[in-house]
Amino acid sequence: MSEKKQNILITGSSGSFGSFICREFLSEGHWVTGIDLNDQQSSPIESNQLDLWRFITCDLANSGQVQAVLDEAHSIRGAFNLVVNNVGLIYNAPLLSFQKGKLQIHDFDAWNKVLSVTLSAGFYVTALCAQKMVATKSPGVIVNISSICATGNAGQAAYSAAKAGVNAMTAALAKELGPLGIRIAAISPGFFDTPSTHANLDEDKIAHIRKSVPLRKLGQPKHIMSAIRFINENDYFHGKVLELDGGLTI
């Protein structure tokens, strides 16, 4: 990581990945702003980091709220040098299912919520942060957290569609933002050893996945962090999705 002190934004800062990323950047002495719907899942700050850390409560699926909180954040330290669009919502449901003797379809409200949180939120944040970067002539880096599910995972149509959208959005915006001095890329994690993985998959399934990964292990949050550092430091990496799955999709 560059020794230069950076102004960093992390969305979904209360989750497993988000809280870890916040703690790592804070430990390196960077200014970090975390945005999430609540901050109950993590307390990333140490007593000597109070002046570096700022948490903002926001429904990231609400474009009006996102604009308001980013206007406030930008007024304090200006444009962000690094933005990590980490927020997402995993939802498990098949398109069709039999329940109580009836054929049911996927909940439409759930579909809209998953896409709003997992895809639209990143678009809102990227647009507003890029606008500030360009207006102040401050080059920056945007990292979108995608997923191995972007190729389609049975039972996760909404989440898969949202993450596929993240990849396509990254590619499209790379063509627009590159000439403006803004780099954007995505990271596509495979199966990681996090509470959300254990909450959404039974242990037998996790054991099977672990055996299927050539490295015979699940990823750890530190692997996401090193990937973010790579993208942030390598000023020729742009517009691509960095697959981080232990070789599962070879």
Image: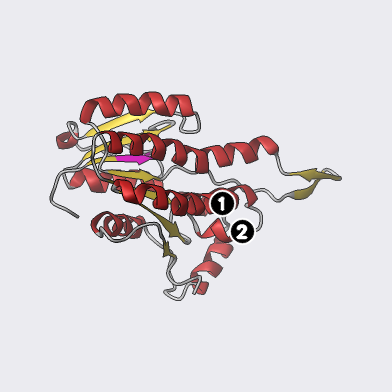
Quarter where residue 246 is shown: bottom left
What residue lies at 76% left-to-right and 44% top-to-bottom? 105
Q: Amino acid at mark 2?
A: Asn
> Residue tagged by mark 1?
200
Earlier sequence position, callout 1 versus callout 2: 2
Secondary structure beneath dot 2 equals loop
**Quadrant location, the N terminus:** bottom left
Image vertical order of residue 250 relative to residue 196, above or below: below
- Does residue 12 show up? no
Nearer to me, 129 or 96? 129
Nearer to me, 186 or 149? 186
Crowd rating for badge 1 (residues with CA inside 10 Å; few <14, some 14–19, many 20+): few
Image colouring = secondary structure
* Residue 87 % position (x, y): 44, 42
Q: Is residue 121 left or right of residue 11?
A: right
> Residue tagged by mark 2?
153
Secondary structure beneath dot 1 equals helix
Q: Is 51 included in the stretch rendered in magenta?
A: no
Q: Residue furthest front?
A: 179
What residue lies at 28% left-to-right and 60% top-to-bottom? 230
Q: Which residues are magenta?
A: 9-13
* Residue 145 % position (x, y): 42, 51
Nearer to me, 154 or 81? 81
Quarter where residue 239 is shown: bottom left
**Residue 236, which numbered label?**
none
Nearer to me, 117 or 204? 117
